[in-house]
Image: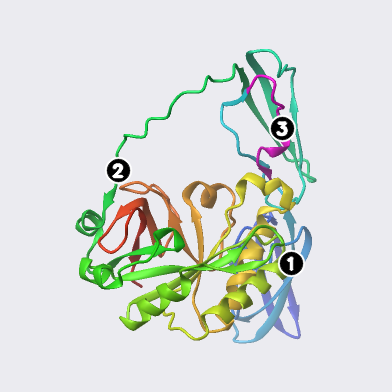
């Protein structure tokens, strides 16, 4: 596509790419659609691709004759992404129990309620293996099909559990030996599950930072609660000038609720020193379908929480595990706290913190604790 014209004696020569479409949510700049131009663009801004349809793009540039001129073209935002079905190759239930395909996570980048259903015959009162197909279709017609087998099994007989097995732990000092260098720091994240912590012992063990749960809500649209050990944990950490971050477990179902949650967090921490990021922890995946959220809506909700935190002078952080970050969360402007319990993560995205394990052991805490690696900026 090529255009040549003169406006008030100013020459404009701009050549555009043939494909003037942008997939929903994809990052594109004005210049990404220009193959040649007789000048320099003054502001090569990002094009908003958060809504479907045609969009007029206008920009100014200085041409070869040093004259400021304007140019415009039109792009179309399209939905080309298929829905996601969170399902393995098989699904098992006990004979006589109902099969609830509506509980299998089925979501879309844009559609809050894609059409999700199962095709095939099965009998939950008869032991067997039934080949079925889970189908998901969004409002743009994008379709995902996934074959799986429904296994109907006999009820298991009651057995006495083996209570003699010793729990295994990941030693804090082993994590230090593996991951500590001049660009990392090693710390932990804690809540009331760790009981009363001996912070002197933590420091002596070399714990360099602590991320503390401030609290959460008792479910979707339920009342707030402050973590039983929050005040103790942050007070003791502040006394020792430890670096402190915060995390909040969210059940929010809207941006308005997420903003309310952020303001609640700010109220709880206002009298304490918090110099590391405040993390948004939303992981209600087993009931995701009930929230009627697209992945874009989910990510926007998280960013509303983190925007509120940022505007109050704190850094924001999005917490999630590797698989959900790769398949469900959309790209965010905020840094990531990655949960992936392996010695070497295969996550390809960027992250500021890595929750390395949830079976850590360190002096000062009885039982297990999460151990984290922080990467210095």
Q: Quadrant of residue 55?
A: bottom right
Work out whether residue 35 can be spotted: no
Q: Which residues are magenta?
A: 94-107
What residue is rendered at 23% in x and 68% in y? 206
Disc nearer the start of the sequence (2/1)? 1
Q: In percent of the image, x 40 and y 63: which residue is there?
A: 189
Tell me the CA gap for discs 3 and 2.
35 Å
Residue 371 is situated, as x and y percent measured from the top left of the image, at 34, 58
Horizontal arrangement in the rendering, residue 160 relative to residue 65 (left or right): left
Instruction: Name the residue tied to disc 1.
Output: 73
Tell me the quarter of the picture where residue 353 sits.
Answer: bottom left
In the image, residue 276 above or below residue 370: below
Q: Check residue 96 for magenta coloring.
A: yes
Q: Quadrant of residue 119?
A: top right
Helix, strand or loop at mark 1: strand
> Badge 3 is on which residue?
100
Q: Quadrant of the N terminus?
A: bottom right
Q: Which residue is mark 2?
A: 168
Callout 3: few (<14), some (14-19), or many (20+) C-alpha neighbours within 10 Å? Answer: few
Q: Position of residue 256 (x, y in %)?
A: 72, 70
Q: Are marks 2 and 1 in contact (CB under 8 Å)?
A: no
């Amino acid at each position: 596509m090529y255009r040549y014209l003169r406006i008030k004696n100013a020459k404009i020569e701009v050549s555009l790419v043939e494909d003037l479409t942008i997939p929903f949510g994809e990052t594109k700049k004005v210049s990404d659609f220009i193959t040649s131009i007789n000048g320099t663009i003054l502001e090569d801004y990002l094009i908003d691709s958060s809504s479907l349809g045609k969009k007029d793009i206008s920009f100014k540039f200085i041409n070869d004759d040093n004259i400021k001129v304007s140019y415009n073209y039109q792009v179309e935002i399209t939905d080309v992404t298929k829905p996601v079905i969170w399902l393995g190759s098989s699904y098992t239930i006990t004979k006589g129990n109902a099969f609830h395909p509506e509980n299998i996570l089925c979501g879309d980048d844009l559609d809050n309620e894609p059409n999700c259903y199962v095709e095939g015959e099965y009998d939950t009162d008869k032991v067997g293996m039934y080949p079925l197909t889970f189908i998901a279709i969004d409002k743009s017609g994008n379709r995902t099909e996934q074959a799986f087998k429904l296994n109907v099994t006999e009820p298991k007989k009651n057995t006495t559990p083996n209570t003699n097995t010793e729990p295994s732990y990941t030693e804090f000092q082993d994590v230090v030996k593996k991951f500590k260098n001049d660009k990392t720091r090693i710390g932990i994240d804690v809540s009331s599950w760790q009981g009363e912590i001996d912070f002197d012992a933590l420091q002596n063990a070399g714990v360099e930072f602590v991320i503390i749960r401030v609290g959460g809500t008792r479910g979707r649209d339920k009342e707030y609660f402050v973590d039983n050990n929050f005040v103790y944990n942050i007070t003791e950490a502040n006394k020792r000038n430890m670096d402190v971050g915060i995390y909040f477990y969210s059940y929010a179902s809207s941006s308005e609720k997420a903003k309310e949650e952020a303001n609640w967090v700010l109220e709880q921490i206002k009298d304490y020193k918090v110099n590391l990021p405040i993390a948004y922890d939303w992981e209600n995946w087993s009931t995701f379908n009930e929230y009627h959220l697209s992945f874009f809506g989910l990510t926007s909700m998280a960013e509303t929480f983190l925007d509120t935190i940022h505007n109050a002078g704190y850094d924001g952080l999005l917490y999630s595990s590797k698989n959900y970050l790769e398949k469900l969360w959309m790209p965010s402007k905020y840094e990531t706290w990655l949960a992936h319990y392996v010695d070497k993560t295969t996550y390809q995205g960027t992250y500021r913190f890595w929750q390395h394990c949830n079976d850590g052991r360190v002096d000062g805490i009885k039982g297990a604790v999460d151990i984290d690696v922080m990467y210095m900026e």
